[in-house]
Image: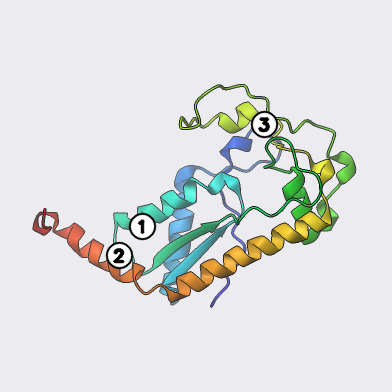
Amino acid sequence: MVFFPQYYAGQIFEARHEPGTIAYSSELQLKLLEETTDEMARNGCKKIVIVNGHGGNEHLLPYFAQSQLEKPHDYVVYVQWGHEPTKKVGAEKAGPDWHAGESETSNTLVTNPNLVHIDRAGNESGADQKRVHLPDNVYTGIWWYARFPNHYSGDGTTATKEQGEADVQSWISAVVRAIKAVKADDDSLKLQKEFYEKAQHPLDTRP
């Protein structure tokens, strides 16, 4: 198994109003991903697992994986993100807890404690502003800014290292399960090859 270096060119258009945000075009992001996975495959990697650590990629990465069917590839892209909710340590949190809130701040207390400044976490509001009113099954790209214009969701002041350790362990377990499943998967590449062949002759496909 080969571990590729951390990949930083993700989707972040929803934070373009924040100082320091570098948001590459969607065309460039997809091209970089394609050339990266193509090069990994050329070097012998036929099963490529992308482990996502950023919510902003949860639409981009499945689309990238789906777009692998556009033309033949001799490798399979798998996308893994998230983990089962961890039991809350202490009092239950109220409202959403996404970006820089209790969970992410707790996790960072474990992975990069030097980056956490709990004393600053209350300087801005992470409350849901609820500025767009749409059904749950209606999506618009401005949803995040409408709800969290400070790019802050939740309350980082309540973060604890204990919660972070539980969350990080849960995530590790989810990634381990995903990797084991991918290593055992002998079907996806064969089915992908079968699909490419049939896609070249769609009129020969039985109705």
The residue shown at (82%, 52%) is 115
Q: Are marks 2 and 1 in contact (CB under 8 Å)?
A: yes
Query: Where does the image place residue 69, in percent across and percent down from the top left?
Result: 31, 56
Q: Earlier in the sequence, mark 2 or mark 1?
A: 1
Query: Where does the image place residue 146, in percent across and percent down from the top left?
Result: 61, 26
| Number of marks present in the image shown | 3
Residue 142 falls left or right of residue 87: left
| Label 2 CA crowd tier, 10 Å (few <14, some 14–19, many 20+) | some
Helix or strand or loop: what does disc 2 sit on?
Answer: helix
Helix or strand or loop: what does disc 1 sit on?
Answer: helix
User: What mark, if any, has residue 68 been given in the picture?
Assistant: 1
User: Which amino acid type is marked by label 3?
Assistant: Phe
User: What mark, if any, has residue 55 been given in the picture?
Assistant: none
Query: Where does the image place residue 68, in percent across and percent down from the top left?
Result: 36, 57
Q: According to the image, label 2 marks what residue? A: 192
Q: Earlier in the sequence, mark 3 or mark 2?
A: 3
In front of the other: label 2 or label 1? 2
- The coloring applied to the image is rainbow
Q: Nearer the viewer, residue 204 or 176?
A: 176
User: Which amino acid type is marked by label 2?
Assistant: Gln
Q: According to the image, label 3 marks what residue? A: 148
Residue 116 falls left or right of residue 196: right
